[in-house]
Amino acid sequence: MAVLSGLDCLLADKSLQEKFKGNIGYLCHSASVTKELEHGLLALQRTFGSRLKKIFGPQHGFVTDVQDNMVESKHYVHPFFKLPVYSLYSETRIPTDEMLEGIDHLFVDLQDVGTRIYTYIYTMTLAVEACTKKGIEVVILDRPNPINGLTLEGNILDPNYASFVGRHPMPVRHALTMGEVAEMHRKYWHKDAANSKVTVIKMKGWKREMSYEDTGLPWVIPSPNLPTIDAAYTFVGTVLYEGTNISEGRGTTRSLEILGHPKIEAFGFHEKLKPVLDKAELKGFILRPLVFLPTFQKHAGIPTGGYQIHVTDRKTFEPWRLCQYLLREMYAELGSDFKWKEPPYEYEFHKVPVDLINGTDELRHWVEKRGTEDEYRAIMKKGQTEWQEQRKSILLY
């Protein structure tokens, strides 16, 4: 039996629908669909009629068409739904008082990908904070964590490196649903939590060990460069390369599964990589040497040597650690041809972008000095005990 998302559960339960008496705003995107692939906006408009007043979209836009970081979506009136569409990736990432005017409930229905760097969880927590000030109820229509709700990986964010790709002290792979992130926010991260009105409409049938394929739900891309569920797994690590001049495969049909640089000769470098990765006991994947031709973004139109990461065992695969090791070796191999991305990145204009992605500057220094496994594990260890205790206290499933 297929899992029912929070949206599907709401649509199936008239008594639940009757709890929401006022006007509604809907924060959604292209992946906000029912189990039959109907967009949630159509279903909610049919259910709540004229009380559905406003649409809100996250990064990449309500229609999930915008490719890149810091490329903003505009506000407009939707030509079919005849409702205002407000972009929360525009001149503001926080809903303004004007946007929230006349709203009693803000339904949040976003498909997350289980990685700290992915911004939808922060669009949600910023919306909770804005709605708390206005006395508006936020209703999370929960959805699966597509890379399972058990596996944790990566360092805890240092608050000194907080940004829109990391607002809260959590690991890179957090193993939470959107609803559980909202619970963490309410219990540990939001100073006005006592005044928050947050309701989570839980899924039915979801189990923490499930990968997205196990849910029986249709996969709709949550952002333009995550075309496959495999990419959601590799993204945990390959997102790191946004902070470098190494391509993460944007401009190909397997973005965020592919890495490379025009100066890498993939087969020769692979011979150097194999003993390093074997010594680190990295498992659950095969690196396939290839040459690719990005059609846009980094190295567009230039033959680029690198690798596709083929995940062979999701249970043993450690994407964050793998990509840190690959980055360390690429940094040494490329020498002066390697470059860290310069600011700005995600509206931070001074700090090194890769430090914001990492949530620390320690990993950049680890790469540059070709650090050891023991040093890597020491960075990973900080704050984990507290995080895991907090996480256990809020789990909904």
Image (spheres, rainbow, N blue to C red):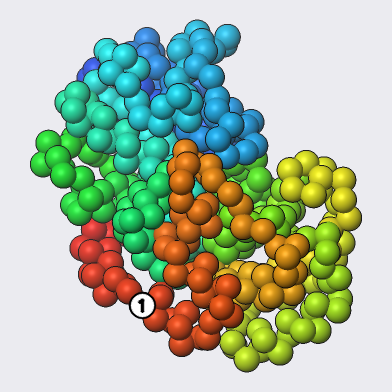
Q: At 26% from the left edge and 53% from the top edge, which residue is drawn?
A: 184
Q: Which residue is mark 1?
A: 381
Q: At 79% from the left edge and 49% from the top edge, which residue is drawn?
A: 299
118 on left or right of 259 = left
User: Where's residue 63, x and y in %?
Assistant: 58, 28
User: Where's residue 392, x and y in %?
Assistant: 25, 66
For the question of whether residue 303 can be seen, the reply is: yes
* Front-lying residue, 348 or 255: 348
Classify 10 Å Cα crowding around label 1: few (below 14), some (14-19), many (20 and above): few
Instruction: Name the element at disc 1.
Output: helix
What is the quadrant of residue 314 in the picture?
bottom right
* Front-lying residue, 125 or 215: 125
Residue at far front of view:
336
Q: At 80% from the left edge and 71% from the top edge, which residue is drawn?
A: 288
Instruction: Count the labels in the image.
Output: 1
179 relative to 72, above or below: below
Q: At 48% from the left edge and 58% from the top edge, which residue is drawn?
A: 355
What is the quadrant of residue 195 in the picture?
top left
User: Where's residue 367, x and y in %?
Assistant: 57, 73
336 relative to 120, above or below: below
* Front-lying residue, 316 or 297: 297
* Front-lying residue, 79 or 267: 267
256 on left or right of 204 = right
User: Considering the image in quadrants, where does the C terminus appear?
Assistant: bottom left
Q: Amino acid at mark 1?
A: Lys
359 on left or right of 73 = left
360 on left or right of 341 = left
User: Where's residue 318, x and y in %?
Assistant: 55, 74
For the question of whether residue 174 can be seen, the reply is: no
